[in-house]
Amino acid sequence: MDRRKPIAVVDTNIMLSLMTCVDLALHSEEPGWSAHSARSRADRVKARQATILSWHLHELKAATYTLWEAIRMTVTKVNAKEGGDPLTHFTVIWVHCVRERLLPDWMIGDPSSEGPGLTLTAGAMAAEVEKLWEGEPTGHAADQLYVNKAKEFGIPLITFEGFRQDGTIDPRAGIRVKAKAAGVTAMTPAEFYAGRDEHQTCTLFLNAFRDQANAFVHESSNPDPLARAVERVEAVYRYVLFGEAGSERLPITF
């Protein structure tokens, strides 16, 4: 197994923002939801930063350390795909199209362990992830483990903890306090990939998604519902990456 040294610790909240299609679709179905609200703008900004970060890490062929919690949640939804829920199709698309086809060179997980990478191509893989997750800490203990790993490897911690709806950062957020006490640098994705051309990166990502998603649908044994889901996923990416909402262009930064 590839044992590349991780270049960053990636907090679970980054992974959840990265798997944005499901969460944004769920939020949009809530009563009173508006694309113009402060929460919606913050969700767009976080999802956009996480997506740019994923492409950045893929291009670097980087390894990062993260707990299996977000990955286990994804596996659980993938295993339920027989139910035909459109939101589950979103998750399947992220795992088997975005992750495997667009971002294959980003090694997610614990590069120093014997555990599997995020390939999710067989039931045994899902069972193995479940076993790995069972022994993981949660809550404050998980935060402390992230900080400990960042200190151990001498690498930054990428997190959205403390990210307010106006884009400012609360330095009193729990994991940031722990990181400061340990001498670990906590940063947002945008701070980590600073210097990248964000618009160009978003264009590269969306074009790659279109190419790979078309092939993914073509190879499917049940292409029609998958094609409809892909159309919705692309619309979510246009909304997140470029602020496209019908004829409107919404803010994608602060």
Image (spheres, rainbow, N blue to C red):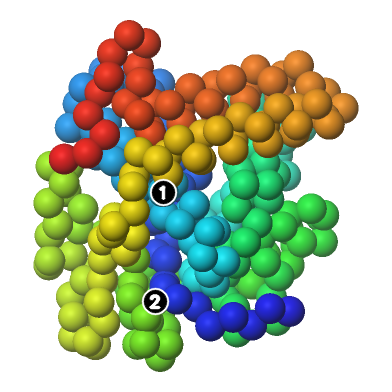
Residue at disc 2, secondary structure: helix
Q: Is residue 23 visible?
A: no
The reply, left or right, for residue 155 in relation to residue 174 is right
Question: Of 200 and 114, which appears nearest the observer?
Answer: 200
Residue 179 bears which disc, if any? none
The reply to whether dot 1 and dot 2 touch (C-beta < 8 Å) is no
Where 119 sits versus 223, above or below?
below
Query: Going 50% across and 78% down the picture, which residue do you hit?
Result: 6
| Residue matched to label 1 | 52
Query: Mark 1 is on which residue type?
Result: Ile
Quarter holding the C terminus is top left
23 lies left or right of 176 = right
Which residue corresponds to the image point at 51% horizontal and 40% vertical from the top-left? 205
Q: Quadrant of residue 2?
A: bottom right
The residue to which callout 2 is attached is 146
Say which element carries label 1. helix
Residue extending farthest bottom: 152
**Residue depicted at x 29% and y 41%:** 45
Q: Do we see residue 194 in this rendering? A: yes
**Residue placed at 66% from the left, 32% from the top?**
211
Where residue 59 sits: x, y (%)?
53, 59
